[in-house]
Amino acid sequence: MRAYVPLLMLIGFVAFNAVMMVALSHLLQANRPTKVKAQPYESGMPNLGTAHERFDVKFYLVGVIFIVFDIEVVFMMPWAIAFRQLDLFGLGMLGALIEMGVFVLILAVGYVYVYKRGALEWT
């Protein structure tokens, strides 16, 4: 249990620090509400329409593409670090290369699908 004392102290300090920063920001804030401050804005620009407008599906497809390629990087980094130690299917490093090849092929099929759907073209 003694080995965990520094870790528990660090967690306690971080939690205390987080609570204190939020509490101090509420206590020390300058609260001067005005009509202009109460209006919603996006990047300093006034609203151009309502919040219930329909968005093109391409916005969502770009988000999904980002998530897919982000997951690819998250998977490839540990794989690249442990590449020499991997022994998949009893084939040694060749098995690891086959595994990554299948993974990249699946991602390539998804990328070609998105490209054929026209999600990467902005009009």
Image (cartoon, rainbow, N blue to C red):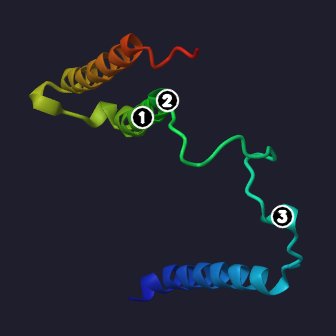
Q: Which residue is mark 3?
A: 37
Left or right: 48, with 95 as reference point: right
Identify residue type, mark 2: Asp
Circle 3 or circle 1, nearest the eye: 3
Q: CA distance from mark 1 to mark 2?
A: 14 Å
| Contact check, label 3 and label 1, Cβ < 8 Å | no
Q: Which residue is mark 1?
A: 64
Q: CA distance from mark 3 to mark 2?
A: 30 Å
Residues packed near mark 3 inside 10 Å, few (<14), some (14 to 19) or many (20 plus)? few
* Mark before the other along the chain sequence, 1 or 2: 2
Furthest residue to the left? 90
Q: CA distance from mark 3 to mark 1?
A: 34 Å
Q: Which residue is mark 2?
A: 56
Q: Is residue 115 above or below residue 44?
A: above
Q: Secondary structure at mark 2?
A: loop
Question: Residue 116 location in percent, x, y?
Answer: 37, 11
Q: Is residue 1 above or below residue 64?
A: below
Furthest residue to the top? 116
Residues packed near mark 1 inside 10 Å, few (<14), some (14 to 19) or many (20 plus)? few
Identify residue type, mark 1: Val
Question: Residue 103 location in percent, x, y?
Answer: 27, 26
